[in-house]
Image (tube, rainbow, N blue to C red):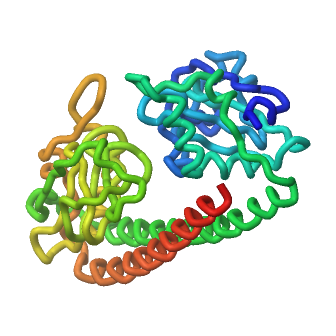
Amino acid sequence: MLLKDLCSHNVGTYGIGASACSFNKNYPTYLRITDITNDGKLVKPLRTSIDPNSYPNWKEYILSKNDLVFARTGNSTGRNYFHNSEEELVYAGFLIRFSLNPEKIVPRYVGYYCQSKSYWKQISSLLEGSTRPTMSAELYRKLDIPIVSKAFQQHIVDTIGSVDDLIENYEERISFLQKISSYLYLQLIEHSRETSYLGNFIKIETGSMNLDENDPNGRYPFYTRNIGTFYSNKYTNEGKGAVVAGEGNFTPKFVNGKFGLHQRAYFIQPSTTKLGSEVIYEIILSNKKYLESVAVGSTVKSLRRFCFEQMPFFIDADYFCLNQILEILFGEIENLKKRKSILLNQKSILLDKYF
């Protein structure tokens, strides 16, 4: 059955053409293409809002429960998000909304279908011949959704949903341990006064890969300048340290092992025993605003080596003790990530089985 026939209203409506502003808890939260990952999750926390005083009709673009939004242009075309919460989000102009009718379909069933390989094959077929990936509302309306009995739809939702619940539990535990690590670092330096430069204690590597080397079924993590999870069948770097995108979002990622690295990303490791890899990650994480202030460029801000080398930090703290504590915490985080990865693989198997 076609997607358009499974909706109650909003059968392919475009989002608001509004400019984003810095996040403000008193303003509506803004949902953009870049906030949605390839696997249909939101990059939390959402960091932008829109000024309701500048857009008096903003309420028309608030997502309702059971809404499904699709990215319509660029490399993100086909990426989608199923809204299954009461969180108030205003969706942006490069997204298209479909409001699913619970009387016609189990809404989350469609959300799961749109994470399957079968869905992506449809998207590829509809995009054939396009020089620049673009999906209009009319094309999305023609998506063919496989129909089974409502009882079986609910069974599929319950089965995959149970795995999703476990994944969310692991994500919450990982986030909790990450917050503890950051708290310990900030507590350690609270009374420190003597500063040095990070460049005296690190070595920096850059990547060599391009975005077209992304393979969803790849063996190795692939860190790019984009938000989201990517994989590749080749790796360019190996070790333990912090990865930072050279453009866009400068939030570091902690890595340990073999991975692919985009040519506009940096891999930062310790060059001495004074600072451990985990401490270097926390130093960079706590100095994200510093990186944003020293990034170069007028339209697209980007980082250079000197941005890391000239980063100031407190040198007179007891890093030896912190290195040991963070190594234990980060080890537990890595274990949780591995368990989460197993669940993600199980979810992928279930999507293949049902769709």
> Where is residue 46 shown, x and y percent of the image?
55, 43
Q: Left or right of 3: which side holds 263?
A: left
Side of 354 where 95 appears, left or right: left
Q: Residue at x 66, y 52 (%)?
A: 112
Q: Quadrant of the C terminus?
A: bottom right
Up the image or down, 72 lies above or below 54; here it is below
> For the view shown, which residue lies furthest in the right direction?
103
For the question of whether residue 20 can be seen, the reply is: no
Q: How many marks?
A: 0
Across and down, in percent, residue 292 comes to 31, 39
Q: In x, y percent, where is residue 102?
A: 86, 44
Residue 135 appears at what percent x and percent y?
A: 54, 26
> Image quadrant for the N terminus?
top right
Q: Which residue occupies 80% across, 36% down?
A: 6
314 and 87: which is toward the camera: 87
Residue 335, located in which quarter of the rendered image?
bottom left
Question: Can residue 312 be seen in the rendering of this structure?
Answer: yes
Relative placement, left or right, of 76 versus 204 is right
Choose between 312 and 13: the one closer to the eye.
Answer: 13
In front: 104, or 181? 104
Closest to the observer: 195 or 343?
343
Residue at 36% from the left image edge and 56% from the top image edge:
231
Relative to 176, residue 29 above or below: above
Q: Which residue is located at x 24 percent, y 53 percent?
A: 261
Viewed as shown, does residue 182 lie left or right of 155? Answer: left
The quarter of the picture where residue 301 lies is top left
